[in-house]
Image: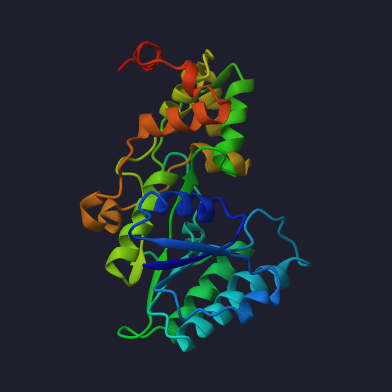
Amino acid sequence: MRILITGEKSYIGLKLKQWLNQWPDRYEVDNISLKNDVWKQKDLSIYDSIIHVAAIVHQKENSNSRNTFYLVNRDLTKALALKAKSSGVKHFVFLSSMSVYGLDGKIGAEVIIDKNTPCNPNTLYGKSKLAAEFELKKIMDERDFKVAIVRPPMVYGPDCPGNYARLSKLVKRSLVFPEYENKRSMIYIDNLTEFIRLIIDTQAQGLFFPQNKEYVNIKDLIDLIAKVNSKRIYFSTLLSKIMNLFKNRIEIFNKVFGNLTYNQELSSHQNFNYCITEFKESIINSELRNMNLESRWSHKNEDTAIGK
């Protein structure tokens, strides 16, 4: 199969290409940048699937950036899909986001997204991604131009930008965290790339919600990051009480310690066969690769530190 991935510097795009390259006899993978108009001259007819991951993500949102978000995340997606369809490409995979729902974590209350949860994005990123989904639904053809829209939750892994990287740095610099437990949907990069591979293989279409097989508890996550980095962390019930007092005033508390999950039934594609890496292993892999310490971490140390 010939695969084209958009976004030459995209984290997910680069990891997906590395993942597919494990099977050189099955996949021939190309990357392309969409930052200029050169892509418009490219022959897309040679590809079986296009994986569109290029997007504006980690950019400050204000009135001046609205046009940029919509030009890249909506209009560019539409233009690429129209060219792909007219070129005879049969399968188009679009990386959307959980942010199309406009829901943040909430401390002390369950926030569960299921098949009946309406989309109501509250950020330019989420709004522009949802707008792109609407455009794709107009273009899709169930027989000749299949479209798969993938809405992953927070993605994490080695060298991954975003919230996981910030949390990891905070754990390494802190001594104490609130004694608090929650449930979050997250997905490890290898699980996501395997999910996309299965989508490609089956030329699947529709809406998809991949996540790790198990929900992530923030306390377990912090504790595990600390242990892999040989760092001692103390969990304080006093801090958790203070956090509860200010949870409605300080937004970051809910973002980090609140509950936000996909109903697992939404994510049971192929009985979760795409979840090839369990939570503990995923955090160990992420932290060790980030520290470049793989060669110094023996199985004996692993067992001792993590308590397997």
Q: x%, y% of residue 254?
A: 53, 42
Q: Residue at x 34, y 65 (%)?
A: 200
**Closer-to-camera residue (49/164):** 49
Q: Is residue 293 visible?
A: yes
**Residue 50 appears left or right of 112:** right
Count the labels in the image.
Answer: 0
- Outermost residue on the front side: it is 25
**Residue 296 appears left or right of 140:** right
**Closer-to-camera residue (305/143):** 143
Quarter of the image containing the N terminus? Answer: bottom left
Residue 150 higher or lower than 89, as above or below:
above
Q: Is residue 248 visible?
A: no
Q: x%, y% of residue 80?
A: 55, 78
Q: Residue at x 47, y 17 (%)?
A: 227
Q: Residue at x 69, y 68 (%)?
A: 35
Q: Residue at x 60, y 69 (%)?
A: 73
Residue 205 higher or lower than 251, as above or below:
below
Q: Quadrant of residue 139?
A: bottom left
Quarter of the image containing the C terminus? Answer: top left
**Closer-to-camera residue (71/90):** 90
Q: Quadrant of residue 269?
A: bottom left
**Closer-to-camera residue (264/177):** 264
- Outermost residue on the left side: it is 271
Q: How is the image coloured?
A: rainbow
**Residue 253 appears left or right of 218:** right
- Outermost residue on the right side: it is 64
Q: x%, y% of residue 125?
A: 60, 63
Q: x%, y% of residue 18?
A: 47, 49
